[in-house]
Image (cartoon, rainbow, N blue to C red):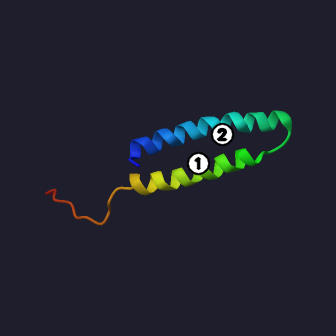
Amino acid sequence: MDIQQLYKDMETLRERLNLKLEDCLENGGMSLEVLGLSQKLDELIVEYMKQAKPDTGTESNEVA
């Protein structure tokens, strides 16, 4: 999965999660679906951070 698609998936999941959380707050309870969406978002964020992290193990070829 490329980083742009990963970011789009995170945004979509965040929107769904926000809607579900609003529904839970209105109805006074947390659903398993909301917990599952939250866990999936956490996983996507971790994957995104791994892919977006700059490669610090390489040397720069720039001359000061």
Residue 15: percent from the left, percent from the top? Answer: 61, 35
Residue 27: percent from the left, percent from the top? Answer: 85, 35
Quadrant hosting residue 24 = top right
Which sits in the foreground, 63 or 5?
Answer: 5
Vertically, is 59 above or below 12? below
Sooner in the amino-acid sequence: mark 1 or mark 2:
2
Q: Which mark is residue 41?
A: 1
Q: Residues within 10 Å of mark 1 (few under 14, many from 20)?
A: some
Residue visible at 69% across and 33% down? 19
What is the tally of numbered marks visible in this picture? Answer: 2
Residue visible at 67% across and 36% down? 18
For label 1, the SS is: helix
- Along the horizontal axis of the image, is 53 left or right of 60? right
Q: Which mark is residue 17?
A: 2
Quadrant hosting residue 23 = top right
Which sits in the foreground, 40 or 59?
Answer: 40
Residue 57: percent from the left, percent from the top? Answer: 30, 66
For label 2, the SS is: helix
Vertically, is 60 above or below 35? below
Disc 1 from disc 2: Cα separation: 9 Å
Residue visible at 64% across and 53% down? 39
Is there a contact, CB below 8 Å, between mark 1 and mark 2? yes
Q: Which mark is residue 1?
A: none
Q: Which residue lies furthest to the right in this view?
A: 28
Q: How crowded is mark 2: few (under 14 residues within 10 Å), some or many (20 or more)?
A: some
- In the picture, which quadrant includes the C terminus? bottom left
Residue visible at 40% across and 41% down? 4
* Amino acid carrying mark 1 in the image: Leu
Vertically, is 52 above or below 4? below
- Along the horizontal axis of the image, is 27 left or right of 61? right
* Amino acid carrying mark 2 in the image: Leu
